Image (cartoon, grey):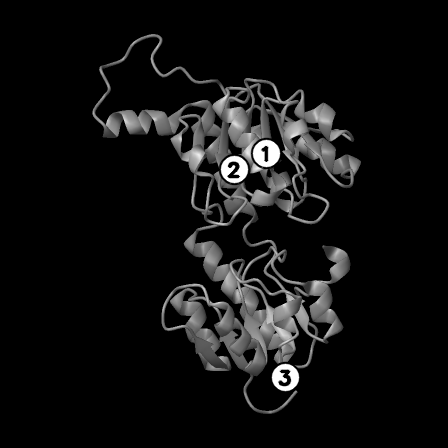
């Protein structure tokens, strides 16, 4: 590596502590405003930077990478998911890609349980009633929700986050079921008291709650399509804190409007920040602005991982959180 400081372009403002440390170690370019970079700004960044620090809002595709300068050798993603980065093309061009795994696990699992509780206990409806000053007092049949204890939860994707959700679900007395690309080891299943379903169809047809915790890949695109969503029980609810592309959002919206599914808690959407407008009208839907991982502690830890990855690379070593195409 050259002796001069690496040129690092950060596409979005990060916690001050992280930005300060980056500036101490590298020649850092930060956006003057906290907004996504335009395509033109991304092109300019990859043409001149040694290291690019993007986030999930930045599309790092083949077209962009084809315009990268020869000096770009590392993409240090601020986030665990890399479905917005063409990792295979980057590797072909000699550009390493790393991410920040294990940081958002507990925070995302917390929010998953929060959404389940919000749906089953009708928390948003109660909040709206109080804010509108429409509550007329307690009555035996008012605002009846469903008990979480004893409910069957079907976890789609039993990686780190899925397992963290399972542990929390057990603590609430839920029965844990899961579908995964690979079955967990017997001791892990025993620890989580989790039942494996090889058939996703059979699992979703029997669950009270479906929790989507798998990454977005070509094989998981619309994994919960219209046909599969119709297998859900009418009283079932579905929660997604993973990626919007895993669910056919239009089919889900139609079924929610028709009362064919009891409710949905969504922190992610098919078109980024643009949730289906029809979803906003429904009382049995809880929509959040992609905030499952949004904790101060988590954002700082993500930044620290980015720092470690870049510093390790600058010292001539393999970044600890290197992402390979085979891992996706």
Query: Quadrant of residue 177 in the image?
Result: top right
The residue identified by callout 3 is 71
The label nearer to you, 3 versus 1, is: 3
At 51% from the left edge and 31% from the top edge, which residue is drawn? Answer: 253
Location of the N terminus by quadrant is bottom right
The residue identified by callout 1 is 211
Helix, strand or loop for disc 1: strand
Which label's residue is closer to the chain start, 3 or 1? Answer: 3
Would residue 144 appear left or right of 326 to someone viewing this image? left
Which label's residue is closer to the chain start, 3 or 2? Answer: 3
Q: Is residue 319 visible?
A: no
Label 3 to label 1: alpha-carbon separation: 42 Å
At 68% from the left edge and 65% from the top edge, which residue is drawn? Answer: 322
Q: Are marks 3 and 2 in contact (CB under 8 Å)?
A: no
Q: Is residue 26 visible?
A: yes
Would residue 85 appear left or right of 144 to someone viewing this image? right
Q: Are marks 1 and 2 in contact (CB under 8 Å)?
A: yes
Query: Quadrant of residue 281 in the image?
Result: top left
Q: Nearer the viewer, residue 286 or 252?
A: 252
The label nearer to you, 3 versus 2, is: 3
x and y percentages locating residue 274 in the rendered image: 46, 46
Query: Quadrant of residue 88 in the image?
Result: bottom right
x and y percentages locating residue 71 in the rendered image: 63, 84
The residue identified by callout 2 is 112
Helix, strand or loop for disc 3: loop
Q: Is residue 31 above or below residue 138?
A: below
Label 1 to label 2: alpha-carbon separation: 7 Å
Q: Is residue 318 above or below residue 200?
A: below
């Amino acid at each position: 590596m050259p002796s001069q400081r690496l040129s690092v372009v950060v596409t979005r403002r990060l916690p001050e502590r992280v930005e300060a440390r980056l500036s101490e170690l590298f020649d850092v370019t930060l956006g003057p405003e906290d907004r996504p970079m335009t395509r033109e700004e991304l092109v300019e960044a990859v043409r001149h930077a040694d290291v690019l620090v993007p986030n999930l809002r930045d599309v790092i595709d083949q077209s962009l990478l084809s315009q990268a300068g020869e000096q770009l050798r590392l993409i240090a993603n601020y986030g665990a998911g890399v479905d917005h980065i063409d990792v295979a093309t980057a590797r072909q061009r000699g550009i390493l890609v790393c991410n920040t795994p294990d940081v958002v696990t507990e925070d995302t699992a917390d929010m998953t349980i929060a959404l389940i509780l919000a749906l089953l206990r009708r928390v948003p409806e109660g909040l709206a009633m109080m804010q509108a000053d429409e509550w007329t007092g307690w009555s035996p049949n008012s605002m009846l929700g469903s008990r979480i204890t004893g409910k069957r939860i079907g976890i789609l994707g039993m990686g780190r986050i899925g397992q963290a959700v399972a542990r929390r679900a057990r603590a609430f007395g839920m029965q844990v079921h899961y579908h995964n690309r690979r079955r967990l080891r017997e001791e892990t299943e025993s620890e989580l008291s989790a039942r494996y379903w090889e058939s996703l169809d059979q699992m979703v047809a029997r669950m009270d709650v479906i929790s989507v915790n798998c990454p977005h890949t070509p094989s998981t695109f619309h994994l919960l399509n219209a046909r599969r969503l119709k297998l859900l029980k009418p009283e079932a609810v579905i929660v997604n804190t993973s990626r919007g592309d895993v669910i056919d959002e239009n089919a889900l919206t139609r079924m929610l409007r028709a009362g064919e599914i009891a409710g949905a808690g969504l922190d992610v959407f098919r078109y980024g920040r643009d949730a289906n407008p029809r979803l906003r009208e429904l009382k049995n839907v809880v929509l959040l602005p992609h905030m499952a991982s949004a904790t101060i502690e988590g954002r700082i830890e993500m930044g620290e991982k980015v720092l470690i990855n870049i510093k390790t690379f600058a010292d001539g070593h393999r970044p600890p959180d290197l992402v390979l195409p085979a891992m996706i």
